[in-house]
Image (cartoon, rainbow, N blue to C red):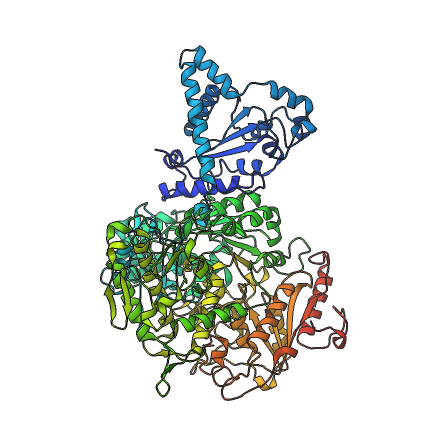
Amino acid sequence: RVEMSMAPNPSHLEAVNSVVAGMVRSKQMRVDVARGGRSRASQRKVLGLLIHGDAAFCGLGVNAEVMQLQDLPDYTTGGTVHIVVNNQIGFTTVPRRARSSPHPSDVAKGYGAPIFHVNGDDPEAVVRACRLAADFRAEWGQDVVINLVCYRRLGHNEQDDPSITLPLLSERIKRQRKVSEIYADRLVADGVATRDEVDRWIERCAAEYQAELDASGTYVESPEDWAVSTYMGQRDSALNVGERLRLEKELRLELDANKTLEEEGVIVEDGPGGPRAVSQEASLSGNGDVATTAGSRFESIEGLDANPRFNPRMFSTGVPLEMIRAVGHAMTELPPENLEFVDGADLDDETARTKAEKDYGVRVGDSVRTAKALLSQLDDVARKARLEHMGLFPPDFIAHPHTRKLLENRRKMVEGELGVDWGTAELLAFATLVLHRYPGEDPAAPPRKHCHVRLSGQDVERGTFNHRHSVLYCSRTSRPVNPIDNMGLGDQDRFLVCNSPLSEHAVMGFEYGFSVDSGPAALVLWEAQFGDFANNAQGIVDQFVATGEAKWGQRSGLVLLLPHGYDGNGPDHSSARPERWLAAASDDPDSLPGRSPRDGELAAKTFAALREKTVDKTVGKTDDADASGFISLDRLRERVEALEAAAESAPAEENVGFEVDDSNDQAFTLFDEHGALIDAASDAASDAATSTRGGFRREPHDARDRLVVEPDDFRGDDDDADVAAGKVLDGAGARDGPQADMDPIALASAAVKASRARSMYDDVRRFFRRDRGRIDRVDWDRYMRHRAKTHADSTCNFVLVNPSTPANYFHALRRQANVPHVKPLVVLAPKYLLHHRPCASPLRDFGPGSRFHAVIGDGDVGDNSVEPDAVTGARERPKASNVRRVVVCTGQVYYKLHQLRRARRIEDVALVRLEQLSPFPHAALARRLARYPNAELVWCQEEPKNMGYWAFAQPRINTAMREILDVEVGADHRAAFGGDDDGDDGDDGDGSGDEVGRGEKTGRRDEVRRVHYVGRPAAASPATGSPAIHAAETRALVHEALGLEHVGIHLAEPRSSVPRY
């Protein structure tokens, strides 16, 4: 039995080749985790097959780049079979003008690949060539090429007439008999088949083709038909929906922690110790066994059940400090130099061990023993630690002096003696992701979310800027050691660091394919030497990374590390071209999720559908005003439970094979797949054309008969709810109905309705942190804004961050591995900050309760430039009444602004760092700006005005000011923001809250408060090639941003004439 997977292929020829190679390597790694998919056994089980055109195979350089990977240890797939369909034409271009070699396959000669030339008019010869190619690849593990020599009988497409440009060749092809005719005559001549048998085969084949053609007129495409990868929260297929509800209820009540609703997915919850995987996920452990994570679907947060899908990018990614210290010790301890091997038995001898430590001035395996005591409480700790340490590092391992000093400093960082720098924070993130359990956890308990980590790119072992050193080399033997891949701290996944060839297109495509196939089981990262080197892979970015999910439902969690920053390195080593990424972001600059007119209408309709109508007893009339009344959580719970009871009573055999459409995690029973309200009145005219059962209707535009719910089923008047699926809801619950008349669709639709109703109820009570009481219209609008923001986050095409602190980078990586809505992550990594001493984070910013911050203002949690008070924990912040200017920036320019502000003792300028740009954190940024209502607003960047972030940030900042701050900010200002679902919350960690909002009303309308630009003027080149000019420009823009006079170069006209955009 052979399982075949076909990768979606864009119209850009050959672009998919490297993606397929990455998918193949990922599948091979699942077969053999211990060797990372490099064993011949795993390579023989998975084969990559690429089909090329003749003009594309020899004309596009990506083929050479991909074939270059065939023998590289970290990229080999044991050979790929290439089939070149040699039609001897490239659209209208003849071979003489398309290539300089006799055959299109000659490019493979440079890589030692055998080439089989075969006549396409001889089917049996083609079969023999393919078998020979497969056998060669299986035996020798190398690429092999089949040059299928044939011709193109028709044009390039339906509208193309080849005779216009190739009249002689077209006439010759017309006279050539078809392959089927030639082979049929041969079968008859050889006595294999009779002419009648051949004619019957032709007639049967034609009939089948005609039947398929006739059926195609009724087929409607569905996104699921093209989905090639699955992630968390995917739909259930062919699952008994009654059993689905029972399982869900059992999980919710914690009656059976081993049963799971989503067998293919992982749900991450935020518990006291950080995020935790609680839905069963099959992943491979380091020894090749399947490790499953299972647990309760809900954990208690402040006494309430927590919906794991609430605010998916806003959860703690911190880890216990004991874990930080343990992995820090494991990845920094080196063997004592020149210490000869001591037999394990000697370590049990106290005298021998003391003598060794005295002679060499070092405690043998001290930190490893400490780490193991914390995690595993191993017996004979000293002996095992010593032996495992000597197994990781050879006895004669001698570290480079620079490396030894680096590791000593990292040891001090994890002990809290020094601030944690960028390279250490990154390795700590990787190390904590591969480990299965935290210190002190019960070994029998389900493991936490863990994954393999694969870091790929040019010079990634050491790091282009000499900052990472994830792989250590012996100065004597050049033998490499990867400490994180074998920390000796218990069960762990693989940490693979792959120095790549000098190729961006092939390697980025390879890692993209690897991430698509591996899913949440691996965090895959690709790093460019410099950010603008990714230009060579722009085709992969445009065709796959930024658009793959929208075009094919192909999801990827690939992380792209693009070094970016203006350090005087010239135009080719400064910019990662963030403007290109931001232009590709699927983000509306003129409206906020949840605040558009359509969102407001949706909130009003849903409130009207769910509210409890009030009755005026004096006149006996029901109040139907849209804004009146309230939603009762108690009443809502009763309705949901009644729906579940009705669905559970459905016969199991009637529900088998029905697919539950749960593609939208946040879908209410009242909403369709786009989040729009289903209006019964507007669809009344089309009811005759649809099948209606129990408030559900079958949508004709969906091949799978998507079922949606009419809002009347949730109205307060129970007598109006027509639930023909056997139960009619009333205040007491449900009463029996005519089940005998129900069809399978009606029965299954009741289960869908109940499931979505439960999802809605869980999400509502999690948001309000209570499950009893009333919700008025103001609070409901706030909830609907949260829902719209969450939906926008789950549908964005990628996430772009520009972290300025090591801790925020640490949390960005851990968040990427844990967040349910997996998207590509683009990290604009710094360069000079890697060794910039002020760019360090205290150890507390990595501990429990810490997380990624989309925006960091002065004195916020995560602000590494201000030390909190030792007693109160409050951080110093500029006084709002004194601040005349707020400078918003992103990335490393903050440190230049902060350095000058501190040197000049400027107290009337506040700095706000934008750490995440897409999805844009509107509410988090607006909250910081609200602290200084009377200050002017400046955007500062190092990039030229037509590059960088200005064109993206300006309209979104103005929109946030207009839509969020265009209100009176009073004591309940937090409600005006509608909560913060942008990756940050309202608590700044200083215990004081925001100055604006404690009884003070500004009454200010922000229509006149616009952001204006400070930075380099528009230019054709990203940066100057002169270090002196670069330094002068940097000084000028920093002085101008802080409002200081500067003698020297000026970037723009005097301030009075600078237009306000």
Answer with the quarter of the image where residue 435 lies: bottom left
Quadrant placement of the C terminus: bottom right
Q: Position of residue 310 (x, y in %)?
A: 40, 66
User: Would residue 967 be visible to someone looking at this image?
Assistant: yes
Residue 1046: percent from the left, percent from the top? 73, 74
Q: Tell me where residue 856 appears, x and y as whole percent.
A: 52, 72
Give the quadrant of residue 948.
bottom right
Instruction: Specify the quadrant of the image occupied by residue 570.
Output: bottom right
The residue closer to the viewer here, 101 or 465, is: 101
Q: Front-most of 190 and 952?
A: 190
Q: Residue at x 50, y 70 (%)?
A: 601
Residue 596 seen in this snapshot:
no
Q: Nearer the viewer, residue 626 or 71?
A: 626
Residue 1003 horizontal side relative to residue 750, left or right = right
Q: As drawn, is 525 to the left or to the right of 754?
A: right
961 versus 537 height, above or below: below
Q: Is residue 362 above or below residue 476?
A: below
Q: Is residue 828 left or right of residue 184?
A: right
| Residue at (57% x, 84% y) in the render | 880
Q: How many marks?
A: 0
Residue sitting at x 72%, y 58%: 1024
Measured as percent of width and height from the top left, residue 263 is found at 32, 52
In what quadrant of the picture does the N terminus appear? top left
Task: Examine the rendered structure and indicate whether residue 559 appears above or below residue 180.
Answer: below
